[in-house]
Image: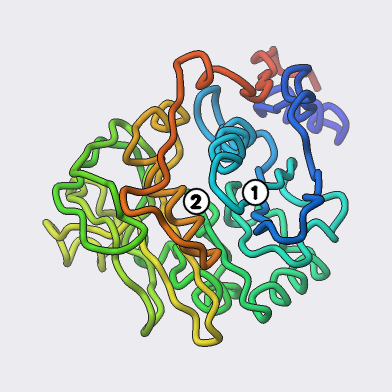
Protein backbone atom coordinates (compact mmCIF):
# COMPACT_ATOMS: atom_id res chain seq x y z
CA UNK A 1 0.00 0.00 0.00
CA UNK A 2 1.32 3.43 -0.87
CA UNK A 3 1.89 6.01 1.83
CA UNK A 4 -1.18 8.12 1.00
CA UNK A 5 -3.77 5.31 1.34
CA UNK A 6 -2.03 4.17 4.53
CA UNK A 7 -2.25 7.69 5.90
CA UNK A 8 -5.92 8.03 4.96
CA UNK A 9 -6.73 4.66 6.49
CA UNK A 10 -5.05 5.69 9.71
CA UNK A 11 -7.13 8.85 9.78
CA UNK A 12 -10.34 6.94 9.22
CA UNK A 13 -9.62 4.52 12.03
CA UNK A 14 -8.38 7.15 14.48
CA UNK A 15 -10.95 8.99 16.57
CA UNK A 16 -10.55 12.68 15.90
CA UNK A 17 -12.20 15.57 17.62
CA UNK A 18 -13.36 18.99 16.48
CA UNK A 19 -11.71 21.52 18.77
CA UNK A 20 -13.54 24.68 17.68
CA UNK A 21 -15.53 26.44 20.37
CA UNK A 22 -19.26 25.89 20.17
CA UNK A 23 -21.66 28.81 19.78
CA UNK A 24 -22.49 28.47 23.47
CA UNK A 25 -18.81 28.44 24.50
CA UNK A 26 -18.17 31.56 22.43
CA UNK A 27 -20.39 33.46 24.87
CA UNK A 28 -17.97 32.76 27.74
CA UNK A 29 -15.55 35.68 28.25
CA UNK A 30 -11.96 34.57 27.67
CA UNK A 31 -8.73 36.30 28.68
CA UNK A 32 -10.58 39.34 30.02
CA UNK A 33 -8.25 41.08 32.45
CA UNK A 34 -9.59 42.65 35.65
CA UNK A 35 -9.77 46.43 35.67
CA UNK A 36 -9.40 46.68 39.46
CA UNK A 37 -5.74 46.08 40.41
CA UNK A 38 -6.73 45.37 44.01
CA UNK A 39 -8.42 42.11 43.00
CA UNK A 40 -6.55 38.81 43.11
CA UNK A 41 -6.26 37.52 39.56
CA UNK A 42 -6.84 33.76 39.28
CA UNK A 43 -6.12 32.31 35.82
CA UNK A 44 -8.06 29.17 34.87
CA UNK A 45 -6.45 27.32 31.97
CA UNK A 46 -8.81 24.87 30.25
CA UNK A 47 -7.25 22.25 28.01
CA UNK A 48 -8.33 21.54 24.46
CA UNK A 49 -10.98 19.00 23.47
CA UNK A 50 -10.33 15.51 24.83
CA UNK A 51 -11.97 12.15 25.54
CA UNK A 52 -15.70 11.33 25.44
CA UNK A 53 -18.66 13.61 26.13
CA UNK A 54 -18.98 14.12 29.87
CA UNK A 55 -15.31 13.34 30.49
CA UNK A 56 -12.41 15.82 30.33
CA UNK A 57 -14.87 18.68 29.94
CA UNK A 58 -12.09 21.14 30.65
CA UNK A 59 -13.82 24.17 29.20
CA UNK A 60 -17.13 23.54 30.93
CA UNK A 61 -15.41 22.80 34.24
CA UNK A 62 -13.36 25.99 34.14
CA UNK A 63 -16.42 28.02 33.14
CA UNK A 64 -18.20 26.75 36.25
CA UNK A 65 -15.18 27.55 38.43
CA UNK A 66 -15.07 31.06 36.98
CA UNK A 67 -18.73 31.65 37.83
CA UNK A 68 -18.25 30.41 41.40
CA UNK A 69 -15.05 32.41 41.95
CA UNK A 70 -16.75 35.62 40.78
CA UNK A 71 -18.78 35.42 44.00
CA UNK A 72 -15.65 35.24 46.17
CA UNK A 73 -14.69 38.62 47.71
CA UNK A 74 -11.57 40.16 46.24
CA UNK A 75 -11.17 37.60 43.45
CA UNK A 76 -11.02 38.20 39.69
CA UNK A 77 -11.06 34.92 37.73
CA UNK A 78 -9.73 34.97 34.17
CA UNK A 79 -10.46 32.00 31.91
CA UNK A 80 -8.19 30.71 29.14
CA UNK A 81 -9.18 28.09 26.53
CA UNK A 82 -7.22 25.61 24.41
CA UNK A 83 -4.47 25.02 26.95
CA UNK A 84 -2.56 28.30 26.86
CA UNK A 85 -3.39 32.03 26.65
CA UNK A 86 -3.24 33.73 23.29
CA UNK A 87 -2.05 36.78 25.21
CA UNK A 88 0.61 35.43 27.57
CA UNK A 89 0.48 38.68 29.56
CA UNK A 90 -2.71 37.25 31.06
CA UNK A 91 -0.45 35.24 33.36
CA UNK A 92 1.54 38.22 34.61
CA UNK A 93 0.76 39.10 38.21
CA UNK A 94 -1.58 36.15 38.71
CA UNK A 95 -1.99 35.09 42.32
CA UNK A 96 -2.67 31.55 41.15
CA UNK A 97 -2.91 29.54 37.93
CA UNK A 98 -5.15 26.48 37.58
CA UNK A 99 -4.30 23.78 35.05
CA UNK A 100 -7.17 21.51 33.94
CA UNK A 101 -5.88 19.73 30.85
CA UNK A 102 -4.39 16.58 29.36
CA UNK A 103 -1.05 15.42 30.72
CA UNK A 104 1.92 13.42 29.51
CA UNK A 105 3.08 14.30 26.01
CA UNK A 106 -0.16 16.27 25.49
CA UNK A 107 0.71 18.91 28.08
CA UNK A 108 0.08 22.30 26.53
CA UNK A 109 3.15 24.01 28.02
CA UNK A 110 5.95 21.71 26.86
CA UNK A 111 7.12 24.14 24.18
CA UNK A 112 10.32 25.77 25.54
CA UNK A 113 9.05 29.35 25.84
CA UNK A 114 5.87 28.19 27.57
CA UNK A 115 7.89 25.95 29.89
CA UNK A 116 10.10 28.92 30.73
CA UNK A 117 6.98 30.97 31.50
CA UNK A 118 5.77 28.29 33.89
CA UNK A 119 9.15 28.30 35.58
CA UNK A 120 9.04 32.09 35.93
CA UNK A 121 5.63 31.81 37.58
CA UNK A 122 6.97 29.22 40.01
CA UNK A 123 9.99 31.41 40.76
CA UNK A 124 7.68 34.35 41.48
CA UNK A 125 5.72 32.33 44.04
CA UNK A 126 2.55 32.09 41.95
CA UNK A 127 0.08 29.56 43.30
CA UNK A 128 -0.48 26.44 41.21
CA UNK A 129 -3.56 24.22 41.08
CA UNK A 130 -3.38 21.05 39.01
CA UNK A 131 -6.34 18.76 38.33
CA UNK A 132 -6.68 15.24 37.00
CA UNK A 133 -4.21 14.24 34.23
CA UNK A 134 -2.29 17.50 34.44
CA UNK A 135 -0.05 15.90 37.08
CA UNK A 136 1.27 13.35 34.53
CA UNK A 137 4.44 14.18 32.63
CA UNK A 138 7.40 12.60 30.86
CA UNK A 139 10.17 11.21 33.05
CA UNK A 140 12.60 13.99 32.17
CA UNK A 141 10.12 16.56 33.52
CA UNK A 142 9.28 14.72 36.75
CA UNK A 143 11.76 16.48 39.03
CA UNK A 144 10.49 19.89 37.94
CA UNK A 145 6.87 18.80 38.42
CA UNK A 146 7.65 17.83 42.01
CA UNK A 147 9.25 21.24 42.51
CA UNK A 148 6.20 23.00 41.05
CA UNK A 149 3.29 20.89 42.25
CA UNK A 150 4.64 18.78 45.12
CA UNK A 151 3.82 15.55 43.30
CA UNK A 152 4.04 13.87 39.92
CA UNK A 153 2.46 10.84 38.27
CA UNK A 154 4.93 8.44 36.68
CA UNK A 155 4.18 5.04 35.18
CA UNK A 156 7.02 3.37 37.11
CA UNK A 157 4.86 3.20 40.26
CA UNK A 158 1.66 5.09 39.40
CA UNK A 159 -1.74 3.58 38.65
CA UNK A 160 -4.87 4.97 37.08
CA UNK A 161 -8.44 3.98 36.26
CA UNK A 162 -12.15 4.51 36.93
CA UNK A 163 -14.01 3.40 40.04
CA UNK A 164 -16.03 4.65 43.01
CA UNK A 165 -13.99 6.12 45.88
CA UNK A 166 -15.19 6.93 49.41
CA UNK A 167 -13.39 9.49 51.52
CA UNK A 168 -14.25 8.51 55.09
CA UNK A 169 -11.83 10.91 56.80
CA UNK A 170 -11.40 14.63 56.16
CA UNK A 171 -8.16 15.86 57.78
CA UNK A 172 -8.07 19.34 59.30
CA UNK A 173 -6.67 21.85 56.80
CA UNK A 174 -7.93 25.17 55.37
CA UNK A 175 -8.58 23.47 52.01
CA UNK A 176 -10.84 20.91 53.69
CA UNK A 177 -12.94 23.48 55.58
CA UNK A 178 -16.66 22.80 55.28
CA UNK A 179 -16.17 19.33 53.83
CA UNK A 180 -17.75 16.15 55.20
CA UNK A 181 -17.06 12.48 54.39
CA UNK A 182 -18.28 11.80 50.87
CA UNK A 183 -18.01 9.48 47.88
CA UNK A 184 -17.43 10.18 44.19
CA UNK A 185 -18.84 7.58 41.80
CA UNK A 186 -17.02 6.32 38.75
CA UNK A 187 -14.45 9.09 38.50
CA UNK A 188 -11.03 8.70 36.88
CA UNK A 189 -8.13 8.59 39.35
CA UNK A 190 -4.36 8.71 39.30
CA UNK A 191 -2.62 7.48 42.45
CA UNK A 192 0.62 6.21 43.95
CA UNK A 193 2.33 9.44 43.00
CA UNK A 194 5.88 10.54 43.65
CA UNK A 195 5.61 13.25 46.33
CA UNK A 196 8.08 15.95 47.31
CA UNK A 197 10.14 15.08 50.36
CA UNK A 198 9.02 18.15 52.36
CA UNK A 199 6.10 20.55 52.38
CA UNK A 200 3.34 18.13 51.32
CA UNK A 201 0.13 17.63 53.31
CA UNK A 202 -2.10 14.73 52.27
CA UNK A 203 -5.67 16.05 52.14
CA UNK A 204 -7.79 13.19 50.76
CA UNK A 205 -7.04 9.50 50.63
CA UNK A 206 -9.29 6.58 49.86
CA UNK A 207 -9.18 2.82 49.25
CA UNK A 208 -8.35 1.74 45.72
CA UNK A 209 -9.32 -1.66 44.26
CA UNK A 210 -6.39 -4.06 44.41
CA UNK A 211 -7.19 -5.01 40.81
CA UNK A 212 -6.10 -1.49 39.82
CA UNK A 213 -2.61 -1.97 41.27
CA UNK A 214 -0.69 -2.72 38.09
CA UNK A 215 2.84 -1.78 39.21
CA UNK A 216 4.97 -3.82 41.59
CA UNK A 217 5.30 -0.86 43.94
CA UNK A 218 1.53 -0.42 44.11
CA UNK A 219 0.96 -4.16 44.63
CA UNK A 220 3.32 -4.04 47.59
CA UNK A 221 0.94 -1.59 49.29
CA UNK A 222 -2.33 -3.46 48.77
CA UNK A 223 -5.09 -2.15 51.01
CA UNK A 224 -3.42 1.19 51.66
CA UNK A 225 -5.55 4.31 51.35
CA UNK A 226 -4.08 6.30 48.46
CA UNK A 227 -3.74 10.08 48.32
CA UNK A 228 -5.56 11.83 45.50
CA UNK A 229 -5.54 15.40 46.89
CA UNK A 230 -2.67 17.26 48.53
CA UNK A 231 -1.30 20.68 49.33
CA UNK A 232 2.31 21.75 48.93
CA UNK A 233 4.19 24.65 50.46
CA UNK A 234 7.09 25.30 48.12
CA UNK A 235 10.52 26.29 49.52
CA UNK A 236 10.23 29.79 48.02
CA UNK A 237 6.87 30.41 49.73
CA UNK A 238 4.63 29.55 46.78
CA UNK A 239 1.73 27.19 47.30
CA UNK A 240 0.36 24.35 45.18
CA UNK A 241 -2.73 22.16 45.38
CA UNK A 242 -3.48 19.00 43.41
CA UNK A 243 -6.46 16.70 42.93
CA UNK A 244 -6.40 13.78 40.52
CA UNK A 245 -10.18 13.44 40.22
CA UNK A 246 -12.38 15.71 38.01
CA UNK A 247 -12.52 13.27 35.08
CA UNK A 248 -16.33 13.06 35.19
CA UNK A 249 -18.02 16.40 34.66
CA UNK A 250 -21.11 15.24 36.58
CA UNK A 251 -19.12 15.13 39.82
CA UNK A 252 -19.03 18.94 39.90
CA UNK A 253 -22.54 18.40 41.21
CA UNK A 254 -21.05 17.18 44.49
CA UNK A 255 -20.73 20.03 46.99
CA UNK A 256 -17.66 18.47 48.64
CA UNK A 257 -15.72 18.31 45.38
CA UNK A 258 -16.59 21.94 44.73
CA UNK A 259 -15.44 22.91 48.23
CA UNK A 260 -12.18 21.01 47.80
CA UNK A 261 -11.24 22.66 44.52
CA UNK A 262 -12.50 26.15 45.30
CA UNK A 263 -10.85 26.16 48.73
CA UNK A 264 -7.69 24.82 47.10
CA UNK A 265 -7.68 27.73 44.66
CA UNK A 266 -8.06 30.31 47.44
CA UNK A 267 -5.40 28.66 49.59
CA UNK A 268 -2.93 28.44 46.71
CA UNK A 269 -3.49 32.14 46.01
CA UNK A 270 -2.82 32.90 49.71
CA UNK A 271 -6.35 34.15 50.17
CA UNK A 272 -8.46 33.47 53.24
CA UNK A 273 -10.63 30.36 53.05
CA UNK A 274 -14.04 30.90 54.70
CA UNK A 275 -14.57 28.89 57.89
CA UNK A 276 -17.15 26.71 56.14
CA UNK A 277 -15.39 26.80 52.78
CA UNK A 278 -16.28 28.79 49.67
CA UNK A 279 -19.92 27.98 49.09
CA UNK A 280 -21.24 27.33 45.60
CA UNK A 281 -24.36 26.08 43.91
CA UNK A 282 -24.98 24.35 40.61
CA UNK A 283 -28.12 23.22 38.80
CA UNK A 284 -28.53 20.23 36.48
CA UNK A 285 -28.98 22.73 33.66
CA UNK A 286 -25.68 24.47 34.48
CA UNK A 287 -23.87 21.12 34.43
CA UNK A 288 -25.03 20.63 30.84
CA UNK A 289 -23.61 23.94 29.60
CA UNK A 290 -20.43 24.55 27.60
CA UNK A 291 -19.54 20.94 26.81
CA UNK A 292 -17.01 20.49 24.03
CA UNK A 293 -18.09 19.42 20.56
CA UNK A 294 -16.72 15.88 20.29
CA UNK A 295 -17.35 14.44 16.84
CA UNK A 296 -15.71 11.12 16.10
CA UNK A 297 -15.07 9.87 12.61
CA UNK A 298 -17.01 6.73 11.81
CA UNK A 299 -15.16 3.53 11.21
CA UNK A 300 -14.71 3.13 7.47
CA UNK A 301 -13.66 0.38 5.14
CA UNK A 302 -9.94 -0.04 4.60
CA UNK A 303 -8.49 1.61 1.56
CA UNK A 304 -7.51 -0.89 -1.06
CA UNK A 305 -3.88 -1.18 -2.09
Q: Are marks 2 and 1 in contact (CB under 8 Å)?
A: no
- Position of the N terminus, as image quadrant, is top right
- Give how far across and how far down residue 191 sits, in percent: 34, 57
Task: Name which residue lies at 44% across and 63% down.
Answer: 153
Is residue 168 placed above or below 154 in the rendered structure? above
User: How far is the residue under mark 2 from the one under mark 1?
Assistant: 11 Å
So how many labels did they put on this image?
2
Q: Could you tell whether 291 is left or right of 4 in the image?
A: left
Q: What residue is shown with label 2? A: 131
Q: What residue is shown with label 1? A: 44
- Give how far across and how far down residue 43 sits, in percent: 67, 53
Task: Name which residue lies at 43% across and 32% down.
Answer: 252
Which one is closest to the eye, mark 2 or mark 1?
Answer: 1
SS for dot 1: strand
Q: Quadrant of residue 12?
A: top right
Q: Could you tell whether 114 is left or right of 155 in the image?
A: right
Q: Could you tell whether 116 is left or right of 261 in the image?
A: right
| Furthest residue in direction left, as rendered | 223
Q: Quadrant of residue 209?
A: top left
Mark 1 crowd level (few <14, some 14–19, many ≥20, 10 Å Cα): many
Task: Name which residue lies at 69% across and 18% down.
Answer: 297
Q: Tell which of 219 and 75 is nearer to you.
A: 75
Q: Tell which of 272 and 243 is nearer to you.
A: 272
Q: Tell which of 22 and 275 is nearer to you.
A: 275
- Give how far across and how far down residue 27 sits, in percent: 77, 23
- Position of the C terminus, as image quadrant, is top right
- Give how far across and how far down residue 219 sits, in percent: 20, 61
SS for dot 2: strand
Amino acid sequence: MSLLPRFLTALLFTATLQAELTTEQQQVPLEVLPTDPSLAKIVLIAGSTSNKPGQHEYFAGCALLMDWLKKAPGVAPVMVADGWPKNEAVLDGAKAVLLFLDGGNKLSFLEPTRWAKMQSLADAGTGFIVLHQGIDCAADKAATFKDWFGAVFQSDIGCRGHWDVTFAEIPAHPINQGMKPFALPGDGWLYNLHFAEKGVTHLLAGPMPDSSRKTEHAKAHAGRAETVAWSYERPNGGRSFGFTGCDLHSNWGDANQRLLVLNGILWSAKLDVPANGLASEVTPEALKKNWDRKVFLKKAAKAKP
